[in-house]
Image: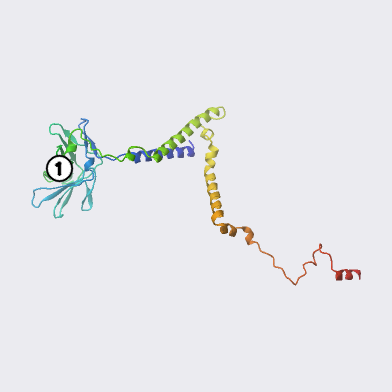
């Protein structure tokens, strides 16, 4: 496969991937690890930091930011942390693992449980953080019940939320123009498909027409209008140079005149005291010259 064909294919793939990424939606949704088919939608909490103090003396502040590492614990970032309220002690209980940890759903309690083992080292093992989301349709987006520690290396936070109820999916009405593809996106899709069809169909047709002289794998002979595509860069450069000169001629005429080579020709200086006609055979001699000739 020629370098030109590979370049065209890479450009088309890049355009399609860009369109896909631009239209993809981010979310904070989790499937039940128990394969029940239920989904936990926390997209309404993905920009919220949850705080809850325990009953210890002095009290600890437990913080949790679902679906992201939005918290600071000294020099570290964290999804969940525990610190003294005077900020003299801070422990990273969990780091966001990009959906690596899925919750388990307990049908009898209508509760989702996250078991994160992604915290900082604690006695030779990662700190463990448990996040409980219980169904409560009257709790709104969230209501924190309590937070605390179980031993030295485990923390938890219990949260009631209407989004923990089975079948609850958070939906935000999108602007009307977001529901459909924009005109520019449609144009790029049509353009990419058109180029793809042009090269594929054209290649097949050329391969059939040239089958007596060239094999199907002879890319240079079967690519449609290959001479034009190979010369296209040079033609584009020439067109740009022509447009530049044309614009300069319209608005900057002096720039072109100064660039004319005739301006650099050296004009000969004439001496008024020299008779330029003496050596010119085409000028008739004067009367005095004729008298000298007769003598």
How is the rendered protein coloured? rainbow
**Quarter of the image containing the C terminus?**
bottom right
Front residue (pair 64, 170): 170
Front residue (pair 201, 22): 22
Q: What element does badge 1 sit on?
A: strand
Residue under circle 1?
A: 143
Q: How many marks?
A: 1
The residue positioned 48% from the left and 30% from the top of the image is 201
Residue 105 x/y as whole percent: 17, 34
Q: Label 1: few (<14), some or many (≥20) within 10 Å?
A: some
In the image, is 93 to the left or to the right of 7? left
In the image, is 34 to the left or to the right of 290? left
The residue sitting at the right extreme is 295
Image quadrant where residue 213 sits = top right
Residue 26 x/y as whole percent: 28, 40
In the image, is 38 to the left or to the right of 15? left
Residue 251 x/y as whole percent: 54, 56
The residue positioned 52% from the left and 45% from the top of the image is 236
Residue 28 x/y as whole percent: 24, 40
Task: Tell me if residue 5 comes above or below residue 271 in the rendering.
Answer: above
The residue sitting at the front extreme is 176
């Amino acid at each position: 496969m020629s370098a030109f064909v590979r370049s065209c294919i890479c450009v088309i793939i890049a355009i399609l991937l860009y369109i896909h990424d631009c239209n993809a939606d981010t979310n904070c949704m989790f499937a039940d690890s128990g394969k029940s088919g239920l989904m936990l939608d926390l997209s309404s909490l993905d920009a919220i930091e949850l705080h809850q103090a325990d009953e210890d003396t002095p009290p600890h502040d437990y913080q949790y930011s679902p679906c992201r590492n939005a918290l600071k614990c000294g020099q570290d970032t964290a999804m969940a942390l525990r610190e003294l309220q005077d900020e003299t002690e801070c422990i990273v209980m969990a780091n966001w693992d990009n959906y690596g940890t899925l919750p388990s759903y307990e049908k009898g309690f209508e509760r989702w449980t996250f078991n994160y083992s992604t915290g900082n080292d604690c006695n030779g093992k990662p700190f463990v953080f448990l996040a409980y989301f219980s169904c409560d349709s009257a709790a709104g987006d969230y209501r924190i019940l309590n937070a605390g520690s179980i031993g030295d290396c485990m923390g938890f936070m219990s949260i009631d939320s209407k989004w923990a109820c089975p079948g609850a999916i958070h939906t935000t009405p999108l602007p009307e123009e977001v529901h459909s593809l924009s005109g520019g996106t449609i144009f790029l899709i049509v353009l990419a498909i058109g180029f793809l069809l042009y090269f594929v169909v054209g290649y097949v047709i050329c391969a059939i027409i040239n089958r007596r002289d060239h094999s199907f794998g002879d890319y240079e002979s079967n690519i449609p209008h290959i001479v034009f595509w190979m010369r296209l860069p040079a033609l584009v450069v020439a067109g740009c140079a022509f447009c530049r000169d044309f614009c300069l001629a319209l608005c900057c005429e002096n720039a072109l005149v100064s660039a004319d080579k005739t301006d650099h020709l050296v004009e000969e200086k004439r001496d008024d005291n020299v008779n330029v006609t003496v050596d010119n055979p085409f000028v008739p001699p004067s009367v005095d010259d004729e008298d000298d000739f007769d003598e």
